[in-house]
Image (cartoon, grey):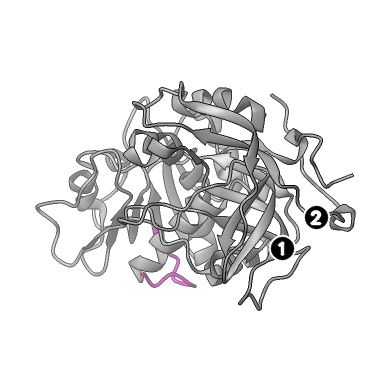
Amino acid sequence: MFRAVCYVSLALITTAAPSTMTAVVVTGEAPEADFSKVRIVPDAPVPTPGNGQVLIRVMASSINPVDWKIMESPMWGKGRVAGFDIAGVVESVGPGCTRLQRGDAVWADLGKGLGSAAGVQLGAWAEYAVADESQVGLKPTTMSFEDAGSLPLVALTTYQAYVQTKAPWRGSNATVVVTSGSGGTGIVGIQLAKAFGASRIITAASPRNFDLLRSLGATDLIDYHKSTIWEALQEESVDVVYDNYGGVGTADAAMPSLKSNGGVFVFLPGKGGAVSNNPKTGVTQIDFGLLNPSKYEELDALAAFVDEGKLRAVVPESHMLQDIIEALKSSVAGHSVGKIGINITHSSSSKSTVV
């Protein structure tokens, strides 16, 4: 499906939010890739911002694998609006808000509370969503809403992972491995590695994606159908391994290539990955754990990278909100490059405030 780019004049947003909205509601827990309990609800209530919160008119969102993986969770028993990534316009602000105001173009990851007893926040796959002002950043000025809606979760994850490494990035000519190059975190991982100062960036991908990944900053590309990254690397040659795939045994396979005088291995959990039980002396291993999406300052740092031309979105596939099942199935198939976009502005019903 062709992309529909969401550039919207903020001056056109003039009326108050309606009382109901179209939203994607998950009515109960389901096995992975079973979307029978995903519903398009045309008259869901528009949330009301509480103290320190803002109501956002959602222009765009996107699909992350975690979106459908967590549908196995019992938290869906009462029915909730799904979705992490959000880009849109502040519709109203609750009491206690001092930084944002109505009409601001913003972006955020609504993943606060993931893994906590209180439960995860969510709510991006709807015409309106509520978020804490403290977690909402100003959208990059040079980026469309749809592109901005594809980045918060993957960009914050990668940014925080790189910060955790405490590697001597800037001006260091570091060598960085991004284990899987063409997915959401891989696309960002390559670009942020370059922005952080890496001079050699190594990744694995299908050859059909090599040109794209080179344009983003990858210097060494391995066809994973034929070989592994580790077979192509010399020992003691790598400063940082960002295992964004998080596969079983990757830490052990990566260990010989990491430098013993400060090499770092950081992995994203989810596919059975773990630290090595036999690490090389002098190598730091980091289990990234869960993303913390609560600090708008980190989104502001990423927005600066975007506006400086150091970070861009890759969204070759986009769906309307009403086609969410098709988008989810495409994500599960695992063949997408970059992110799958959800165009909410152009999916709006007659209740839309954009005229």
Q: Residue at x 28, y 49 (%)?
A: 234
- The answer to whether any part of residue 230 appears in the image is yes
**Of residues 289 and 209, which is closer to you in this image?**
289
The type of residue carrying mark 1 is: Ser
Q: Quadrant of residue 33?
A: top left
Q: Percent position (x, y) of residue 216?
A: 58, 48
**Of residues 297 and 259, which is closer to you in this image?**
297
Residue 174 drawn in magenta = yes
**Of residues 20 and 138, which is closer to you in this image?**
20
Q: Residue at x 40, y 31 (%)?
A: 28
- CA gap between label 2 and label 1 equals 9 Å
The type of residue carrying mark 2 is: Ala
**Which circle marks residue 92 in the picture?**
1
Q: Which element type, helix, strand or loop, lies under badge 2?
A: loop
Residue 105 drawn in magenta = no
Q: Is residue 90 left or right of residue 213?
A: right
Q: Main secondary structure of the magenta part?
A: loop
Q: Percent position (x, y) of residue 68?
A: 43, 34
Magenta highlight range: 167-175
Q: Are marks 2 and 1 in contact (CB under 8 Å)?
A: yes
Q: Is residue 203 left or right of residue 10?
A: left
Within-10-Å neighbours for mark 2: few <14, some 14–19, many 20+? few
Q: Is residue 65 left or right of residue 289?
A: right
Q: Percent position (x, y) of residue 297?
A: 55, 72
Quadrant where the C terminus sits is top right
> Label 2, on which residue?
16
Q: Which element type, helix, strand or loop, lies under badge 1?
A: strand
